[in-house]
């Protein structure tokens, strides 16, 4: 149901491509772990995302969204479909996850392709952190709000 990456100790970048949900019309999210994936934290996230949409049939639009620290996950996009060529790709970086004196921050950039009749292309950028205890973060989970995830990915340890 999710893509779990554990054993984090250094700044890490995860590149996901051809990400597709099993359920149509769902949102890609992430969560962290402080016990190497034995459990995933489900509250206390703060995030901000900015998005722009190019729609061939209507005017372009953009917006932003965020959370005041009560979110159960970090939201990284808009609704994603699973038909035809619909998919998304993203680069996600988690900075200094082993740091215990400051909050660990994350950034992401996502491209969503909706190949439905509106030919939507959505660009999303954002940042986030967990506002709970400043314990080391050693796990990262990617999941959709409903259904399973399918993706190609690579994990790069940066320092």
Image: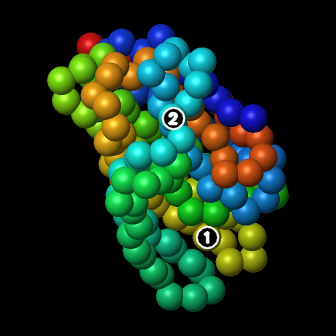
Q: Is the residue marked by circle 2 packed among few (<14), some (14-19), or many (20+) residues within 10 Å?
A: some
Residue 150 marker: none
SS for dot 1: strand
Tag 2 residue: 41
> Could you tell which of marks 1 and 2 lies nearer the N-terminus?
2
Q: Quadrant of residue 81?
A: bottom right
Q: Quick one: quadrant of the N terminus? A: top right
Q: Quick one: quadrant of the C terminus? A: top left
Query: In the image, what residue occupies the spot 73% across and 62% down?
Result: 25
- In the visual, does 59 lie left or right of 115? left
Query: In the image, what residue occupies the spot 51% across and 35% down?
Result: 41
SS for dot 2: loop
Q: Is the residue marked by circle 1 packed among few (<14), some (14-19), or many (20+) residues within 10 Å?
A: some
Can the viewer see residue 11 in this picture?
Answer: no
Q: Quadrant of residue 50?
A: bottom left
Q: Nearer the viewer, residue 119 or 89?
A: 89
Horizontal and vertical percent for residue 39? Answer: 59, 25
- In the visual, does 82 lie left or right of 133? right
Q: Nearer the viewer, residue 90 or 30?
A: 30
Between the residue at mark 1 and the residue at mark 2, the CA separation in whole angstroms equals 32 Å
* Vertical side of 88 occupied by 114: above or below: below
Can the viewer see residue 108 in this picture?
Answer: yes
Query: In the image, what residue occupies the spot 47% across and 11% down?
Result: 7
- In the visual, does 78 lie left or right of 103? right
How does the figure colour the protein chain or chains?
rainbow
Tag 1 residue: 120
Q: Are marks 1 and 2 in contact (CB under 8 Å)?
A: no
Give the mark toward the camera: 1 or 2. 2
Horizontal and vertical percent for residue 61? Answer: 45, 80
* Vertical side of 32 occupied by 69: above or below: below
Query: In the image, what residue occupies the spot 35% across and 46% down?
Result: 128
Q: Nearer the viewer, residue 138 or 70?
A: 70
């Amino acid at each position: 149901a999710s893509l779990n990456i554990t054993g984090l100790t250094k700044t890490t970048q995860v590149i996901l491509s051809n990400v597709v949900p099993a359920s149509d019309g769902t949102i890609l999210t992430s969560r962290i772990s402080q016990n190497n994936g034995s459990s995933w934290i489900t509250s206390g996230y703060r995030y901000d995302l900015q998005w722009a949409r190019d729609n061939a049939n209507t005017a372009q639009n953009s917006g932003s969204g965020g959370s005041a620290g009560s979110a159960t996950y970090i939201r990284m996009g808009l609704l994603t479909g699973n038909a035809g060529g619909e998919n998304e790709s993203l680069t996600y970086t988690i900075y200094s996850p082993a740091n215990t004196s400051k909050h660990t921050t994350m950034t992401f950039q996502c491209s969503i392709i909706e190949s439905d009749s509106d030919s939507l292309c959505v660009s999303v950028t954002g940042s986030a952190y967990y506002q709970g205890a400043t314990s080391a973060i050693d796990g990262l989970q990617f999941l959709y709000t409903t259904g399973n995830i399918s993706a190609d990915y690579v994990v790069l340890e940066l320092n």
